[in-house]
Amino acid sequence: DQQVKQNSPSLSVQEGRISILNCDYTNSMFDYFLWYKKYPAEGPTFLISISSIKDKNEDGRFTVFLNKSAKHLSLHIVPSQPGDSAVYFCAAAVNSGGSNYKLTFGKGTLLTVNP
Amino acid sequence: EAGVTQFPSHSVIEKGQTVTLRCDPISGHDNLYWYRRVMGKEIKFLLHFVKESKQDESGMPNNRFLAERTGGTYSTLKVQPAELEDSGVYFCASSLYRQGAIRFYEQYFGPGTRLTVT
């Protein structure tokens, strides 16, 4: 039973345009949502996050939107650059006691930004 | 500041053999997590340490997997005996949990160990 779903395995956009990556979740107990970026042969790198009590968080070219009623979040990258080409993972954190914030991941979306 | 390191980067073993993966977290990070990504699937949580104590082992697949964190520093994950379905990429992550700190839930990942069981 997948609690975090990224239904688009891949996305291709032109340089300079907006990239929108989507994520849906089923567990209403998640406390935080995170986006990680991953290049081949590297570990996931933290990109941006949002608390479950917020609906938007912005950091430079990256903005994450959270719609709790729809259990949906999205990552917007504007403008997209070729260096943004990577696999993007949506992850959700739930506090499982003490300092344990284990992450539940989606399967990832491969973003390709074409020059 | 050095990041999370993992050794080896790649391991190929035969079914029935034993393999030990090592993770060195970021210095000072009390929280250490192990995750695994099997081909075609999502990254899944295995277990969580706070210092040398296992806090959550709910993601460990079975008793062929043994994780330790001696002295609360580096951690090892032993698979004995390895089976074909154990193949995948094993990630280690660490975090610095401080009450009131910004993004205290953020985890820093290592590059992973790719395990291939033949």
Image (cartoon, grey):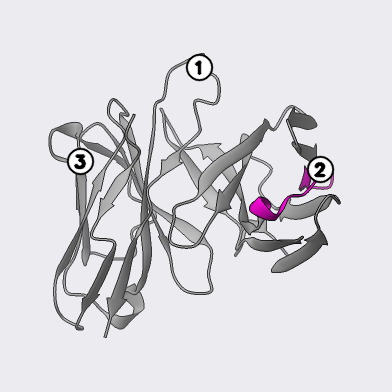
The Cα–Cα distance between marks 3 and 1, rounded to whole angstroms, is 24 Å
Q: Which mark is residue B74?
A: 3
Q: Could you tell me the amino acid type at mark 3?
A: Tyr
Q: Are marks 3 and 2 in contact (CB under 8 Å)?
A: no
Q: Give the crowd class for mark 1: few <14, some 14-19, many >=20 residues within 10 Å.
A: few
* B53 on left or right of A56: left
* B61 on left or right of B67: right
Classify A49 as above or below A110: above
Residue A8 visible in the current orientation: no
The Cα–Cα distance between marks 3 and 2, rounded to whole angstroms, is 39 Å
Image quadrant in which you'd find residue A99:
top left
The residue indicated by pointer 2 is: A78
Mark 1 vs mark 2: tell me if same chain: no
Which residues fall within the magenta stretch?
A67-84
Task: Point out the residue furthest to the top here.
Answer: B100
Q: Position of residue A58 (x, y in %)?
A: 75, 30
Q: What residue lies at 55% left-to-right and 20% top-to-bottom?
A: B102
Chain at numbered mark 2:
A
Q: Nearer the viewer, residue A99 or A13?
A: A13
Residue B4 visible in the current orientation: yes
Image quadrant in which you'd find residue A76:
top right
The Cα–Cα distance between marks 1 and 2, rounded to whole angstroms, is 28 Å
**Residue A83, magenta (yes or no):** yes
The residue indicated by pointer 1 is: B101
Q: Nearer the viewer, residue A85 or A2?
A: A85
Q: Could you tell me the amino acid type at mark 1?
A: Ala
Q: Position of residue B2 (x, y in %)?
A: 32, 34
Task: Point out the residue furthest to the front here.
Answer: A115
Chain at numbered mark 1:
B
